[in-house]
Amino acid sequence: MSSRARRLLAVTGRITLSRMASNPSFDVSTGADLQEVDNAVNQALKEIQQRYDFKGTDCSIEFDREKAEIRLAADDEFRMDALYDVLQGKLINRGVPVKNLTLGDIVQGSGQSVRRTVSLAQGIPTDIARKIVKSVKDAGFKKTQASIQGDEVRVTAPSRDDLQSVIAHLRGQDFGLELKFGNYRG
């Protein structure tokens, strides 16, 4: 018997435990496993050290886990494109959603050297979250509610079938991010 039940029994002489009826829900989120990103960066570094077209060049890839950014540096724009292609291939192989990458502008360094920052989306931005909520509401699902919870969107509905319909609807939309559906509560 739980401590709450014991207290109720001592105070009232009876136990009445009521559970509040809650609707099933799930969370819509996005993000990448940062360990997989780190592994992909290390694999890309190994490849550029071994490739003939990168011999004698000053190309580098740095991963900043705190900011979820990858910084690329190359001798010229041609090698920058090749460097990004190698990185993108390794990210795809490691299962990192490249749809969540935001490619920064090329910044000129000293001489012909160039730099570029690639940002990883680790949460749904507010403007995209609003679009997701609006899409769920406009689709006309009965008694289905979507609300923004920080960098996630929580969807609740009276039945699991409604939630499955919402997931299918959201998968058919393009919000510019790879959406993940998880944290199901039934």
Image: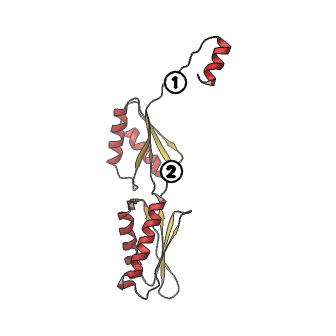
For residue 141, say whether it is visible. no
Q: Residue at x 50, y 43 (%)?
A: 148
Q: Residue at x 40, y 29 (%)?
A: 158
Q: Which residues are magenta?
A: 122-126
Q: Quadrant of the C terminus?
A: top left
Residue at the image position 36 percent from the left and 85 percent from the top: 53
Q: From the image, tell me which residue sits under label 1.
A: 20
* 125 within the magenta span: yes
Kindly identify which residue carries mark 2.
126
The amino acid marked with disc number 2 is Thr
| Residue 121 placement, left or right of 4 | left
Location of residue 102 (image quadrant): bottom left
Q: How is the image coloured?
A: secondary structure
In terms of image quadrants, where is residue 86? bottom left
Which image quadrant: the N terminus? top right
- Nearer to me, 94 or 21: 94
Foreground residue, 128 or 178?
Answer: 178
Q: Position of residue 130 (x, y in %)?
A: 46, 46
The residue at the far front in this view is: 1
Q: Position of residue 2 (x, y in %)?
A: 60, 24
| Label 1 environment density (alpha carbons within 10 Å; few <14, some 14–19, many ≥20) | few
Please state the horizontal and vertical placement of residue 72, each as a whole percent of the image.
47, 75
**Quick check: is 123 in the magenta stretch?**
yes
Q: Amino acid at mark 1?
A: Met
Residue extending furthest toward the top = 13
